[in-house]
Amino acid sequence: MRKVKPSVIAHGRQVTERFFPDSKVGWVGPAVRMGKRLQKTNGYDVIVTTSPPMSCHLIGLELARRFRIPWVADFRDYWTIYRAEEVFADESRRARARRLLDRIKMESRAITAVNRSIVDYLGAGEVVPNGYDPEIAELWRTPPPDRPFTIGLLGHQHDTREIEPLLILLERLRNRRPDYLAEIRILQVGQIDAGWFRRTLAERGLSLESDLRQRQTRADTARILSQAHIFFLGISDKEGPGFLPGRTFELIASGRPVFAYAGPDSEVARVVEPSFCACCFHDDSYEMAAERLASQVESLLNGGYRCEPLSDYARQFSADELSEKFAVLLDRVV
């Protein structure tokens, strides 16, 4: 069985000692009553519930039985991080969680999941991943063909564990090609403590420009980060290999090489590695990543840098494409 950190188990047990299947279970009764009223008024053809919270699927179970209409159970992130049968304190509750999952699989007409790890865990289902907004993605442009070489960061940066791999990577590049490090700046959009970030760089002896833009609109985010030549994507190990942040798909749509700190069996690696010039690395492969980063800097300095916004690979993750995929599934179950 997959190992779960004691802190995760303890947190889950604090909740599940009193509530099953989760602390949100109190909303099931009112939600079922509202669902019954809506169904009698509108006569829906299908029910879709998405989880977490786990209790959401209890609503789907009840409404599907009551009205005898198809039910699609959708499983999102965290199902492989906080596995229901692993966070309960005793075997009787773990068994109860397993029975609930079996009921969901048996009584739903179809199962969808946001990534392959969840499908593998369930032993059933079809992957319909997160994706990107095609209208925003159309705003991506190729970056300037001249220096400085810009590393883009998208999203909140507040966890040292997420940014640490980038710092180590830059240190390895400095050891390999100090002249290349002098060509680099960091461009970030999202919530960040600028003082903390710059102090962290200084403590590591990384004297490079950092342009921290804080929060922006989604459209302005794409316009600003179009200056980036590559993106760094850091995932804290505490999230586990099944975690796949939504911003991953925006980075793939941008067409830039994505340097992702992710294990070889992770969902991030599964999605990112087939994209353009991606580099997934972990604790045992920093030197490889530093070499790849040096190669990217050199390509810019020598006039050979290129990127491909909205590549054929990226287009499968457009929200329009994914909506069509889900619509086909709904037609099938109805």
Image (cartoon, rainbow, N blue to C red):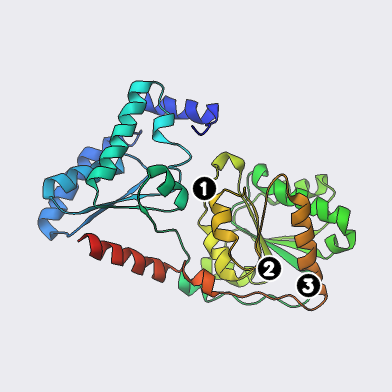
Q: Earlier in the sequence, mark 2 or mark 3?
A: 2
| Three-letter code for the amino acid on which mark 1 is drawn | Phe
Residue at 70% across, 52% down = 194
Residue 239 coordinates in the image, percent (x, y): 55, 42
Pointer 2 residue: 228
How crowded pointer 2 is (Cα within 10 Å; few <14, some 14-19, many 20+) is rated as many
Label ID, residue 28: none
Q: Is residue 50 left or right of residue 164?
A: left
Q: Tell me the element at label 2.
A: loop
Residue at 51% across, 46% down = 242
| Three-letter code for the amino acid on which mark 2 is drawn | Ala
Pointer 3 residue: 299
Residue at 73% across, 49% down = 285
Q: Is residue 14 left or right of residue 148?
A: left
Q: Tell me the element at label 3.
A: helix
Residue 39 coordinates in the image, percent (x, y): 14, 54
Residue at 58% across, 39% down = 238
Residue 1 in view (yes/no):
yes
Pointer 1 residue: 243
